[in-house]
Amino acid sequence: MSIDSDEDENIKGKDSSFEIREYNWKEIIARFLPLVRPYRGRLIISAICVSFVGLAVSIMPLFPKYIIDEAIPKKDLKLALIFAGLFLISQFVRMGLWFFAMFHVFSIQQSVIFELRAMSFGHLQKLCLRFHNKYPSGFLYERIFGNSINNLGVFMQIVFQQLATQFAGLIFSLGFCLYLSPPLTCVILAGAIGYVIAARLLSKRIYKKTQAANIAGMHVTEIIMDKLRGQKTIQAYAMEDRVQDEFERQLWPAMMKWLEGVLESMKLGFVTEGLGYIITALVVVGGAYAVMELNQPLGVLVAFLGYQATLVGMIQGLTNTYGQFASANAAFDQLFSVLDTNSSVVEKPGAKMPEKTEGALEFKDVTFGYNDKKTVLNNLSFVIPAGKTVALVGRSGCGKTTVSNLFLRFFDPSSGSVLIDGQDIRELPLRQYRSLWGVVLQDPYLFDTSIAANMRYARPDATDDEIIDTLNRARAWEFVKDYPDTINHRVGEAGVQLSGGQRQRLAIARCMMLKSRLVILDEATSALDPESEAIVHESCDSLFKDKTVIVIAHRINTIKRADIILVMDKGTLAEAGSYNELLAKNGLFKYLHDIAISADGFKQKVKEVGFA
């Protein structure tokens, strides 16, 4: 919707700062369980398979033990082949169980990510414009659909693929180690305690650095999307080099934040790797002593060295996942801080639409501001009778677009009431109430799909013939028919492949597709040539018959057609009446009117930005 200059300053003051709540693991699990609960049967089966995989991994070091201690002393090749056959069978079974379990794990992972993305997108659609005007789309994309959900997907993969297998293998391997040599097992357990201490000490630093890196990454995404959307302006002003330099200056600190997060995770890996070498040295020396002085079989030492390597690897893997848990925690905090944000425009529980809507509208003592510092509307009151066409006029920044925003309940007034047929619109179900309106914006947004699909956003069941008929009435068919695919022509992102006037005519056609009771036209014909404007007005006259229509316009030809003209000034109602009545009053409307038609009033036009 077009926004007057002062209103634009109030509405579009973007602020990427967002308070991130820190969730504990109890809260995280409580939020995650409902997402995985539908798949608990498949998860249990996968967990059983993973347990057998861990068991198969844990028996691998026993193979060389029995070869050394049993087959070689007896010089029994047949026995060695039996051991080899049992080993191969166990490992091929392990591979099959692993494939089966991971197939279900990845399937569940994608299902949960789908639910998260669908839930996130649905929540963003419910949040009011006050939220969307504050936070840029690039910031929200990266926070929700980019970094956060991707990290949560990796977290699920780590839990089900690595953590479960390593944990199962660790339990079985420790059992075999205790069976083979309790003293050497105590050495490994002492090292495991060192791993846990290192992970606990470094995890908070990893979390903070990861959080900072994620926020910096979101800022970079925001910059990229903003500059890509502004390519036309950048190239028109030949700003490519300056924008490139600015981008590189802002990119480098973000990369450093990412590097700091990676270095913290590397520190944890460095500590755990060093502990692994110490454990290995102690086990080798202790095992050698047991073989030489205590007559322990050599195969036991070989097996234990295999278990030591397996256990150290598993413990290192489990410890390193601590850092990945910290990254997942940061991602969860970022995602659910947004999902736990509530809209300032709330639907009243149990709200119901009246059986019949006449379309009488009223502002009753309405005061409103986009922030606490400045009000845009001040104790504004007026009545629009049902079935009438009303024009809102006035200087730029007087609050015309704000009035339409409040009628559509994009925002709620700070005080006072907006009424339809005498009922406060806050008492009505939000989506059903908005469905009463057809809207044409000054800068209409077209989705990156076909013309027909854009029309069907207004009426999904519309036939091709109905679309073509509507395009004809909106004077849009004259250019649509020239495309090879006609109504199946793709319009590009935000309708970039179309001219401003073509986008506006398609927006008017889309509004005509609706069977709405109320209509807002915000400079709906400002980009049309006089001939097309006249034809579209004729179509609108029949289409908007018996409907309540609010027109925000600067063109005198558009204003003349209104039944009532409301003249606004500094957020209040200055005058109201018909075109001729207001001219006869010799007030603000007459003043602005004379500027618009004056041949030598160009400087005043620029100053006033009133009629054009």
Image: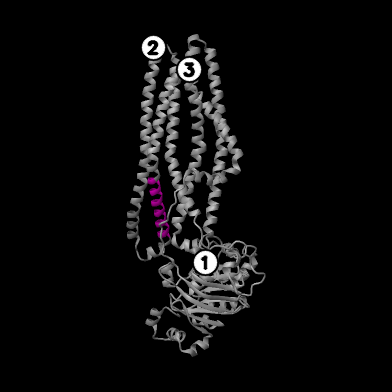
Foreground residue, 311 or 488?
Answer: 311
Decide whether residue 222 is among the magenta residues. yes
Q: Is residue 535 left or right of residue 11?
A: right
Look at the picture and state if 517 lies above or below 76.
Answer: below
What is the x, y in percent for residue 83? 53, 17
Please identify, in this view, whether the residue under mark 2 or under mark 3 is nearer the observer.
Answer: 2
* Position in image of residue 262 (x %, y %): 37, 42
- In terms of depth relative to the viewer, which is nearer, 221 or 53? 53
Q: Earlier in the sequence, mark 2 or mark 3?
A: 3
Name the amino acid type tagged 3: Lys
Camera sees residue 554: no
Q: Residue at x 43, y 44 (%)?
A: 327
Tell which circle, 1 or 3, labels the residue nearer the N-terminal end: 3
Q: Is residue 93 above or below residue 401?
A: above
CA–CA distance between discs 2 and 3? 19 Å
Determine which residue is flagged by label 2: 293
Image coordinates of residue 432 in percent, x first then y, are: 61, 65
Q: Mark 2 falls on what kind of element?
A: helix
Magenta: main secondary structure equals helix
The magenta stretch is: 208-228
- The local secondary structure at tag 1 comes to loop
Q: Residues within 10 Å of mark 3 (few under 14, many from 20)?
A: many
Indicate the quadrant containing the C terminus: top left, top right, bottom left or bottom right: bottom left
